[in-house]
Amino acid sequence: MTTMKNNPDPDNAAILLDAIAQAPQQDDDTTLGEAWLLGFDTETTGTGSSDAIVSASLVLRDPAKGYLGDVVAEWVVNPHRHICEGASRVNGFTDEFLEANGAEPGDAIAAIGSIVTAAQAKSIPLLAYNAPFDVRMLSGDLKRWKLQALPDELLVVDPLVIDREISHRHGKRTLTYTTEYYGIEPHGDFHDATADTTAAVDLIKPMSTLYPQVGNLKLGDLMDWQRKAHKKWKDSFNKWIESRGRRPITDNWL
C-alpha cells in the first residue's frame, strides 16, 4: 500500500493522479465487482452548510490487488473557521492543532477536487459511506475557495444505500456496525478519515459475494439503481417516523 500524508507537498497528489492515469478506462458495462474505486471520507468542523473539511482521505482500490495495492492520500486542512465541540470530540481535532498543522485549503481542497475529477474521467466511481455528506462538504469547500467545481454528473458508490436495499436486518447502520456485519476488520480507528475510507471500500467485496446482484451491477446503471433504492428506503422510513408523530425526512440522494 502506498500512503501519502499531510500535504502541502504537491508530489502526493501527483502520485495518486499518476496511479489513476495508469488505471484502465472503465465504461458503462464495467461491473461494480470488477471496478476500480476511489474511496473518499472527510472529517469536518461540523455538519452544517457553513462547515468545512479538516481532514480527508482518498483511497484508490485496484480490485485485483485489494487492500495491499491501495494508493492512499491523506490531508489535514486548516479550515480557517472554528471546529464545533461535538465534531472535535468525534474526530479529535482542535482549532489549535489545525492552525499549526493543517495545509492551506486552497491547496489541499484543489488537490482533492482534481483527483476526484481525474478518476471520474476514467469512470472510476467515487465511493463514500453516506456519500451526499462528503460530496456536499467537498463541493462547499471548492465553492468557498473559488476552485474548480466537481463534474456536474458524478459516478458515485454509496455502500450505505446499497446495504439498506439488500440487507433487511434490524439495528444501526453506522459504518462501524455495517463493517462488523460483513466481517470486515478495520485498518485503524474509526473516525480517522483513512480508516473510514478503507473500511467503506472494503465493503464492496463481501457485499458482491453475499449478494451477486450487487457485484453484477453495471456502472451505467449504478446511479439510477441507488436513487431508486434510496427513495424506496426513504418512503418506508418516513411512514414509520410519521406514524410516531415525527417530521419526515426530505433529503434526496445524489
Image: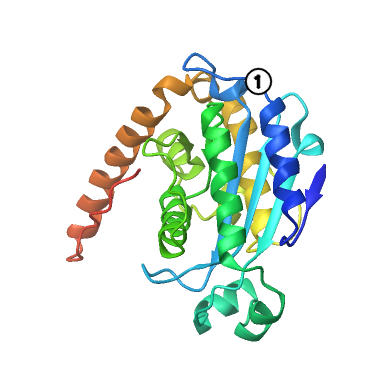
Q: Quadrant of residue 34?
A: top right
Look at the picture and state if 120 lies above or below 7: above
Q: Residue at x 82, y 42 (%)?
A: 1
Most foreground residue, 126 or 66: 126
The amino acid on which the numbered mark 1 sits, given as a three-letter code, is Pro
Most foreground residue, 40 or 164: 40
Look at the picture and state if 66 lies above or below 173: above
Protein image colouring: rainbow
Kindly tell me whether residue 28 is visible in this rendering. Answer: yes
Q: Position of residue 152 (x, y in %)?
A: 36, 39
Most foreground residue, 108 or 216: 108
Q: Residue at x 46, y 72 (%)?
A: 46
Q: Position of residue 55 (x, y in %)?
A: 62, 64
Kindly tell me whether residue 185 is visible in this rendering. Answer: no
Q: Secondary structure at mark 1?
A: loop
For disc 1, the neighbor class at 10 Å (few under 14, some 14 to 19, many from 20) is few
Q: Which residue does the numbered mark 1 point to in the structure image? A: 24
In the displayed image of the protein, which residue is found farthest to the top?
29
Most foreground residue, 60 or 228: 60
Look at the picture and state if 94 lies above or below 4: below
Q: Position of residue 164 (x, y in %)?
A: 42, 41
Q: Position of residue 209 (x, y in %)?
A: 61, 25
Q: Residue at x 70, y 56 (%)?
A: 74
Q: Quadrant of residue 232?
A: top left
